[in-house]
Amino acid sequence: MENKVETIKQEFNVDKRCVWGLCPDIFARIKLGERVVNMVNDIDLLIEKSKFENGFLVDSPPTRVERRPEPPSTLSSSAHHTLDMVLNKLRDESIQKIGIWGMGEVGKTTILDLLNKSHEAETYFDFVIWVTVSNSWSIGKLQNEVGKRLKIKIDANESNDPVASKFLQRLEGKKYLLLLDNVWDEVDLSVVGFPNANQQNGCKVVLTT
């Protein structure tokens, strides 16, 4: 709009004449005036549209994938086999929940790391959310982790249900991949605030235990 205003200013300063230069070109001035009026209306509309009733967005939206420390470059043959199996399950639309089971220190977390940075994670999902559960987990702790990942502010005294509602609202219509690491007990994801992963919404859950 500023560029257009400058153009009109330049045209206004040009002394246009008619009748062999004897008289000012009234018709050119009238057309220029009409353009000025239209531009004023456009600027008024632009100003009206640029009013943000709910304030401005200060923080950028959450990234699709959160970068983590690089996993080890070398993997055992069994870990490679497990990774290939999990990737095939991720590509299968009929499968929503995948469990990776094994004793400690066999590379389960490393496989999640590789999933987190995989082409499938980057391409198929709107959000890839990593949550470390551990044996001292609680709904509140999980919600705090998810809130940080989704950039949702959680008040210290806020109960689980309102927080779950915030998550449901943020994730509505989104295809998420939830990576749950180090699960020791059953976790009710609906209480945390995750829409149920199903074939219709394309969401998936991968857990290690």
Image (tube, rainbow, N blue to C red):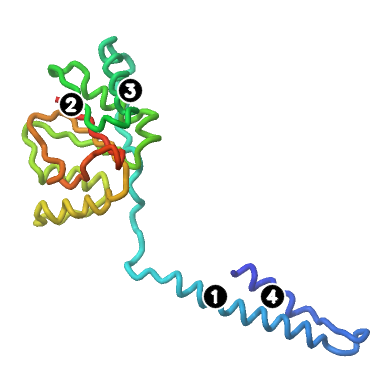
Q: Quadrant of residue 4?
A: bottom right
Looking at numbered disc 4 in the image, what kind of residue is underneath it?
Ile
Q: Is the Cβ of the residue at disc 4 closer than 8 Å to that at disc 1? A: no
Mark closer to the observer (2, 1): 2
For residue 8, the mark is 4
In this image, 97 relative to 4: left or right? left
Q: Position of residue 17 (x, y in %)?
A: 85, 84
Task: Please state which amino acid type lies under the numbered disc 2.
Answer: Thr
- Residue 88 is labelled as 3
- Nearer-N-terminus badge (3/4): 4
Residue closer to the observer: 130 or 71: 130
In this rendering, is residue 45 above or below 136?
below
Labelled pair 4, 2 in contact (Cβ < 8 Å): no
Q: Residue at x 32, y 42 (%)?
A: 175
Residue 208 marker: 2
Identify the secondary structure beneath mark 4.
helix
Nearest to N terminus: mark 4 or mark 2: 4
The kind of residue tagged 3 is: Asn
Give the side of residue 125 with respect to residue 109, left or right.
right
The x, y position of residue 49, in whole percent, is 45, 71
